[in-house]
Image (tube, helix red, strand yellow):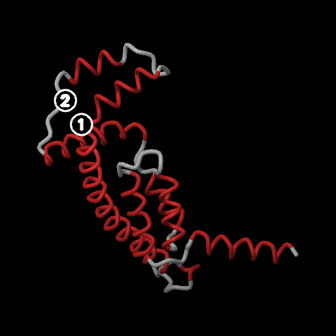
């Protein structure tokens, strides 16, 4: 009974995680995760990634690892830089008095409605630069992630194939 349970759980995990996918499919899942993780869809990253992984039949672990490659300590800098790139591409300037209005904003409490109303008003002109810049940046990072991940996975699989316990050729010293 225990052997059957272990086999059933193992088979279920293999189907769920797609651990035997090709290097290209695993790298594609990781790259899609990176794209989503750096995309402008704040707050929806995990749900969007898992939905796409199930719909497209991709490796769930690889896509989630890709999503969470956008770490909290780089997010603010990433989105600020990509918004600046988007503003440059779209020819959008900073709103007048942006710095002073932003400093003034943080004299208000974060739990007051007035804070959020003013923040939305201040950032509204930067919405399209944010969307365009972070989408383009996410696409570049996703493409790069695919190339790097595929090369890494293929190299790792070649290495594992040559280990004696995997049935591949034995190394001789």
Give x and y (percent) for residue 62. Answer: 48, 63
Sort mark 2 into few (<14), some (14-19) or many (20+) by Cα contacts within 10 Å: few
Q: Quadrant of the C terminus?
A: bottom left
- 127 left or right of 20? left
Q: What count of labels does the image hold?
A: 2
Name the residue furthest left: 91
Q: Are marks 1 and 2 in contact (CB under 8 Å)?
A: yes
- 142 left or right of 132? right
Mark 1 or 2, nearer chain start: 2
Give x and y (percent) for residue 26. Answer: 45, 71
Q: Is residue 46 above or below residue 166?
A: above
- 99 left or right of 56? left
Mark 2 falls on what kind of element? loop
Sort mark 1 into few (<14), some (14-19) or many (20+) by Cα contacts within 10 Å: some
Mark 1 falls on what kind of element? helix
Q: Is residue 27 above or below residue 166?
A: above
**What distance separates the C-alpha of mark 1 from that of mark 2?**
7 Å
Give x and y (percent) for residue 63. Answer: 47, 62
Q: Which mark is residue 26?
A: none
Circle 1 residue: 125
Q: Residue at x 27, y 37 (%)?
A: 80
Q: Residue at x 34, y 66 (%)?
A: 146
Give x and y (percent) for residue 61. Answer: 53, 62
Q: Is residue 170 above or below residue 25?
A: below
Q: Residue at x 43, y 59 (%)?
A: 33
Q: Residue at x 52, y 55 (%)?
A: 47
Q: Quadrant of residue 20?
A: bottom right
Circle 2 residue: 95
């Amino acid at each position: 009974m225990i052997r059957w349970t272990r086999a059933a759980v193992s088979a279920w995990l293999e189907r769920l995680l797609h651990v035997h996918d090709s290097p290209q499919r695993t790298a594609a899942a990781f790259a899609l995760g990176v794209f989503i993780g750096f995309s402008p869809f704040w707050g929806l990253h995990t749900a969007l990634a898992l939905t796409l992984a199930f719909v497209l039949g991709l490796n769930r672990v690889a896509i989630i690892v890709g999503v969470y490659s956008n770490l909290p300590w780089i997010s603010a800098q990433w989105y600020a830089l990509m918004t600046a790139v988007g503003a440059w591409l779209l020819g959008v300037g900073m709103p007048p008095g942006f710095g002073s209005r932003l400093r003034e904003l943080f004299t208000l409490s974060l739990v007051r409605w007035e804070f959020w109303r003013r923040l939305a008003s201040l950032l509204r002109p930067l919405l399209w630069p944010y969307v365009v810049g972070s989408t383009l940046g996410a696409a570049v990072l996703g493409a790069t992630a695919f190339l790097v991940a595929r090369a890494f996975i293929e190299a790792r699989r070649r290495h594992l194939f040559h280990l004696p316990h995997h049935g591949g050729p034995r190394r001789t010293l």
